[in-house]
Image (cartoon, grey):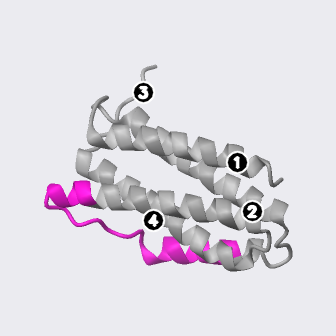
């Protein structure tokens, strides 16, 4: 059975990239105050910079198309904040925080891969950006493995 491609526009793809990058950024901002290891803090700060660059790139691409980048809805953002608070309530070890970061990067890879697999244009601004984000996330995971 052949997979049916969803109708995803370049604008909706870029919007999903923007939301994904913003969620990564906000999650790191929520986690950073709990990080005690300076090397992990430095790695997370570099990742934060990357997420913010990807969000800005997606927002700029949307703006060129006269579309305003939209944040994830409040319920999703609050759910992520509560999840981070819950997951760090009992443990803020370097290993545990690295594990949470790896889980977040894996979710980002999964989300971007789903979009790439369902988008009809193999060579567009959104597909190039999504592939770059997947590589970025894979690199982040490799760095974070050193903190487990």
Q: Which mark is first along the chain, 4 or 2? A: 4
- In the image, residue 122 sits, relative to residue 62, either above or below, namely above
Region rendered in magenta: 60-84
Above or below, 92 against 117 in this view is below
Crowdedness of circle 4 by 10 Å Cα count: few (<14), some, many (20+)? many
Q: Is the Cβ of the residue at disc 2 closer than 8 Å to that at disc 4?
A: no
Q: Which residue is mark 4?
A: 22
Q: 50 or 22, which lies in front? A: 50
Residue wearing tag 3: 3
Q: Earlier in the sequence, mark 2 or mark 3?
A: 3
Pointer 2: residues within 10 angstroms few (<14), some, or many (20+)? few
Q: State left or right for residue 50 relative to residue 80.
A: left
Q: Whole-Å distance between the Cαs marked 1 and 4?
A: 21 Å
- The answer for how far apart the CA atoms under marks 2 and 4 are is 23 Å
Q: How far apart in space, not on screen, are marks 4 and 3 (Cα)?
A: 29 Å
The residue where tag 1 is placed is 143
Q: Which type of secondary structure does the marked residue at label 3 adopt?
A: loop
**Relative vertical location of residue 132 with respect to residue 35 in this rendering, above or below:** above
| Tags 4 and 3 touching, CB below 8 Å | no
């Amino acid at each position: 059975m052949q997979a049916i491609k969803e109708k995803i526009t370049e604008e909706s793809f870029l919007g999903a990239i923007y939301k994904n990058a913003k969620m990564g950024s906000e999650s790191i901002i929520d986690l950073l105050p709990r990080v005690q290891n300076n090397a992990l803090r430095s790695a997370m700060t570099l990742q934060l910079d990357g997420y913010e660059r990807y969000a800005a790139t997606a927002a700029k691409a949307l703006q060129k198309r006269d579309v305003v980048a939209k944040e994830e809805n409040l319920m999703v953002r609050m759910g992520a904040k509560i999840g981070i608070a819950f997951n760090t309530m009992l443990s803020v070890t370097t290993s545990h925080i690295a594990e949470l970061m790896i889980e977040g990067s894996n979710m980002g890879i999964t989300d971007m891969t789903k979009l790439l697999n369902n988008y009809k244009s193999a060579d567009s601004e959104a597909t190039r950006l999504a592939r770059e984000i997947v590589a970025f996330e894979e690199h982040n995971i490799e760095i974070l493995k050193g903190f487990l």
